[in-house]
Image: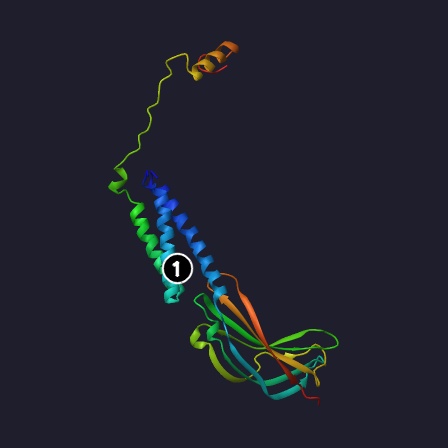
Amino acid sequence: MDFRLPSTDQLLLYGLLSCALIAITSGCIMSSFKTMLMVYGIGVFLLLLIFIPDWPYFYRHPREWMQPKRLESSSSIISQSRAELLRSSSFDSKGHR
Amino acid sequence: MHSYALRVNTAVTLAIMVLAVLCSFVSLSDHFHASSPHVHLEVLSIDAFQRQKAGNDEVWLTLNISADFSSVFSWNTKQLFIFVAAEYVTPKNVVNQVSLWDAILVSKNHAKFSIKTRNKYSFVDQGNNLRGSDFNLTMYWHVMPLTGAMYTEKQVFSGFRLPTE
């Protein structure tokens, strides 16, 4: 089974939902709305502490971005359509009229 | 998630939305709360029965109000607004409701009480139809929650009569 770690925003959502669950349980047990809000507030604050500052673990596995390719061959679609435009109308090589 | 602003924005928005869902669950939990208040109302005496200058009847009563609302308070209750209303029928108006006394109960500790009091607000009729008429005393209570919608219930005590003279 291929397991991939959830992305940051998904982790944040799961963290918030579990905070909410813990908060509502503790509020029900203590029968106090204030307790629920305080537990939720502390949970949210801890989550913000984990996710917002630039911690080193965010740099561990950088995503590979593709390098931009230069338009060399005339067989590419973009260069073909550009050639058509140049032939068909009075546009110059830069695309202006 | 590449900048502070984006992370703060996402996190705070999500936290507030989850809080909204949390509050809706809390207000739904009020449906499972069983409340059984005990109320007793009676009229101890009719102190004065006058006619005002404009021709309207005015009555002053002494009421004995004893109630125990502590079971109505749940974890989602902010306060309870209670009032006693006199209801009667006249040839001119089918329904007349006059509020005689009210109170705000802020917590469970204040919820059990028993007082003998004159009506706080004047009991005035539109016209002079109060001689010898029957009236009901109804105790209404509005439950104001911390989150969610307010609801109101009542208990009717009937069989009171005003004197004929």
- Between B162 and A14, the residue placed more toward the observer is A14
- Between A36 and B163, the residue placed more toward the observer is A36
| Count of number-bearing discs | 1
Q: How is the image coloured?
A: rainbow
Kindly identify the amino acid type of the residue bearing the numbered disc 1. Ile
Residue shown at 36%/54% (left/top)? A19
Vertical position of residue B25 compared to residue B75: above or below: above
Quarter placement of the N terminus of chain B: top left
Would you say residue B155 is visible in this rendering?
yes
Side of B23 where B117 appears, left or right = right
Residue shown at 56%/69% (left/top)? B152
Would you say residue B147 is visible in this rendering?
no
Quarter placement of the C terminus of chain B: bottom right
Residue A7 position within the rendered picture, expressed as x and y whole percent measured from the top left: 34, 41
Chain designation of label 1: A
Residue B114 position within the rendered picture, expressed as x and y whole percent measured from the top left: 49, 83
Residue B120 position within the rendered picture, expressed as x and y whole percent measured from the top left: 56, 80
Under tag 1, what secondary structure?
helix
Residue A80 position within the rendered picture, expressed as x and y whole percent measured from the top left: 45, 13
Q: Which residue is mark 1?
A: A24
Q: Quadrant of residue A26?
A: bottom left
Residue shown at 46%/71% (left/top)? B73
Residue shown at 36%/66% (left/top)? A30
